[in-house]
Image (cartoon, grey):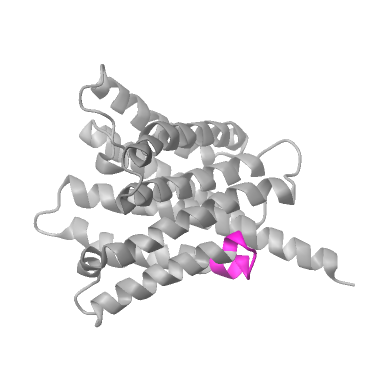
């Protein structure tokens, strides 16, 4: 694991820690990002358990001796989150783009967790193995990008007021995310595509969601949105680091 990948791992760990702290603070799940039914038995207890698991997993990822175990816990947790909470939403409303948006957002987190799991395996992960979470990442970016186009007004409303051409930026960022997803999927400058996407998500998190937590009426939603956006961004950086590392290795092997 090179320096770029280690930094990405730390970002992912911090994201998990933030999710855990948020869950413990509010005693609940992450709102629409974790749509656990209100009538579920022992829901509050489960929320605290999941928050504690997120916090401990994130902390363990920062400890070299525990990182391998933590990566396994993280990928199982993210996979259950995706399968149990997001896939049913798409099955219930397959023609509603926002359903696919939610699926795509958590898929980015799952792709990051999956990449970490493979990176901490006993054997050196194969290029084919690391390619699988990258494919999931590429597929996930397409509905995320399309949401900017389907819901242009809502997306434009999130653009900071000091920037011009809000609707134009909504269209452009959506198209760029779709292009990044296709670039990763079809290996067209995949390292650049993944890195630019992770950079764009970082800018979005800082420019859109961070100011909200300092507002006069900041409450649970701004903090949850900031935390979830940070976690999605962290997943993107983990995959981007892996794609870039694999791309460099392939170039070195091909060099005379």
Q: Which of 204 and 26 is in front in this view?
A: 204
At 28% from the left and 34% from the top, the residue drawn is 29
| Magenta-drawn stretch contains 126 | no
**Vertical arrangement, residue 126 with respect to residue 165, above or below:** above
At 76% from the left and 39% from the top, the residue drawn is 123
At 24% from the left and 40% from the top, the residue drawn is 31
Residue 208 in picture, x, y percent from top left: 27, 64
Q: Which residue lies furthest to the bottom in this view?
A: 164
Residue 199 in picture, x, y percent from top left: 46, 67
Residue 177 in picture, x, y percent from top left: 44, 66
User: How many marks on residues?
Assistant: 0
The reply to whether residue 240 is in sight is yes
**Vertical arrangement, residue 4 with respect to residue 126, above or below:** below
Q: Using the rendered view, name the quadrant where residue 50 is placed.
A: top left
Q: Is the magenta stretch mostly helix, strand or loop?
A: helix
Point out the image quarter for the C terminus: bottom right
First to last magenta residue range: 184-193
Q: Using the rendered view, name the quadrant where residue 43 is placed.
A: top left
**Vertical arrangement, residue 147 with respect to residue 69, above or below:** below
Q: In this view, does 73 lie to the left or right of 167?
A: right
Q: Which residue lies furthest to the top in this view?
A: 41
Q: Nearer the viewer, residue 111 or 6?
A: 111
Q: Residue furthest right?
A: 256
Q: Is residue 56 left or right of residue 37?
A: right
The reply to whether residue 205 is in sight is no
Residue 23 in picture, x, y percent from top left: 29, 35
Q: Residue furthest left?
A: 216
| Magenta-drawn stretch contains 191 | yes
Q: Which of 254 and 100 is in front in this view?
A: 100
């Amino acid at each position: 694991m090179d320096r770029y990948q280690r930094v990405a791992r730390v970002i992912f760990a911090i994201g998990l820690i933030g999710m855990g702290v948020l869950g413990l603070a509010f005693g609940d799940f992450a709102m629409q990002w974790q749509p656990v039914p209100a009538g579920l038995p022992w829901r509050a207890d489960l929320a605290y358990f999941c928050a504690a698991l997120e916090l401990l997993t994130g902390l363990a990822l920062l400890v070299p001796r525990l990182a391998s175990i933590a990566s396994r816990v993280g990928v199982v947790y993210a996979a259950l989150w995706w399968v149990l909470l997001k896939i049913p939403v798409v099955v219930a409303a397959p023609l509603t783009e926002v359903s696919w948006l939610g699926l795509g957002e958590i898929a980015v987190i799952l792709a990051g967790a999956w990449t970490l799991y493979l990176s901490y395996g006993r054997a050196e992960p194969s290029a084919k193995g690391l390619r699988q979470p990258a494919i999931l990442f590429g597929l996930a970016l397409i509905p995320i990008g399309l949401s900017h186009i389907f819901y242009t007004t809502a997306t434009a409303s999130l653009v900071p007021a000091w920037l011009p051409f809000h609707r134009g930026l909504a269209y452009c960022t959506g198209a760029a995310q779709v292009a990044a997803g296709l670039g990763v999927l079809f290996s067209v400058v995949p390292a650049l595509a993944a890195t630019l996407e992770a950079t764009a998500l970082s800018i979005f998190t800082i420019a859109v969601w961070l100011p909200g937590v300092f507002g006069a009426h900041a409450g649970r939603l701004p903090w949850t949105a900031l935390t979830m956006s940070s976690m999605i961004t962290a997943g993107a950086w983990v995959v981007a680091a892996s794609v870039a590392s694999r791309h460099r290795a392939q170039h070195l092997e091909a060099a005379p």
